[in-house]
Amino acid sequence: DAKTTQPTSMDCAEGRAANLPCNHSTISGNEYVYWYRQIHSQGPQYIIHGLKNNETNEMASLIITEDRKSSTLILPHATLRDTAVYYCIVYFKAAGNKLTFGGGTRVLVKP
Amino acid sequence: NAGVTQTPKFRILKIGQSMTLQCTQDMNHNYMYWYRQDPGMGLKLIYYSVGAGITDKGEVPNGYNVSRSTTEDFPLRLELAAPSQTSVYFCASGAQYNEQFFGPGTRLTVL
């Protein structure tokens, strides 16, 4: 079973920041938070991951609360090409690198 | 680098037929995975491999077989195709403790 809860869908205006929440209240101390996205009909694409510190890369920022029970993926300037399903995954690195995908959040970026 | 390649892109099978879905990666990754994705759902892990000669079952292995004779290749075999196996199949690879890279998918219909 997926260990995360995400909103089913959300809309975002082009050029604005998109903030995608994820609840992972049962996360354990050695589990990471990973984000992937899947643009229509394509294979999923890795975005970012973190353990407890906030992380930023060229695609997005990841904000993890101090108690690690929730996190937010931030797309700083959403474009139409960011329309996709975004998956938040709690991941235990030693468990064979296996990912468990939930339903994700369907993000629609509107002009 | 081509990354993860999958063949064929599309296939229609009749009930009871067999086929092999091919997956090749050129990133020298030890870990490889097969997922299936039903319409509107997240990905489910079928089989995975942590290195040549080593495979293990995922969440939904019934009706499938795999082999891993080389680092590069991880074919998925369907022996007696059933309509319930109509899905999109994604292959992925990754280095230990790192993100997974996904192929473009094979769209399979069983009639």
Image: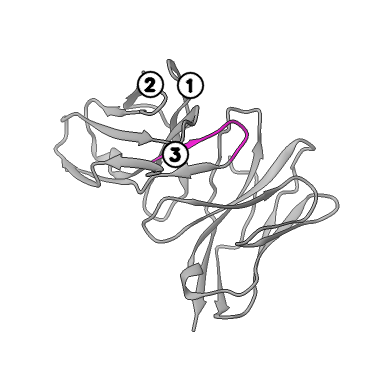
Counting labels gives 3
Spatial separation of the CA atoms under disc 1 and disc 3: 13 Å
Q: Position of residue A86 (x, y in %)?
A: 54, 58
| Residue at 34%, 46% in the rendered image | B105
The tag earlier along the polypeptide, 2 or 1, is 1
Of all residues shown, which one is farthest toward the front? B1
**Subunit bearing disc 2:** B
How many residues crowd around disc 3 within 10 Å: few (fewer than 14), some, or many (20 or more)?
Answer: many
Q: Position of residue A46 (x, y in %)?
A: 55, 50
Spatial separation of the CA atoms under disc 3 and disc 2: 15 Å
| Residue at 33%, 27% in the rendered image | B64
Spatial separation of the CA atoms under disc 2 and disc 1: 8 Å
**Subunit bearing disc 3:** B
Which numbered dot is residue B70? Answer: 2
Amino acid on which disc 2 is placed: Thr
Q: Secondary structure at mark 1?
A: strand
The quarter of the image holding the N terminus of chain B is: top left
| Residue at 64%, 62% in the rendered image | A60
Amino acid on which disc 1 is placed: Gly
- A83 left or right, relative to A66: left
* Residue beneath disc 3: B92
Q: Secondary structure at mark 3?
A: strand
Which-is-in-front pick, marks 3 and 2? 2
What residue range appears in magenta?
A: B90-98
Front-most of residues B15 and B20:
B20
Which numbered dot is residue B51? Answer: 1
**Subunit bearing disc 1:** B
Q: Position of residue B21 (x, y in %)?
A: 27, 34
Q: Secondary structure at mark 2?
A: loop
| Residue at 32%, 28% in the rendered image | B75
The tag earlier along the polypeptide, 3 or 2, is 2
Of all residues shown, which one is farthest toward the bottom? A111
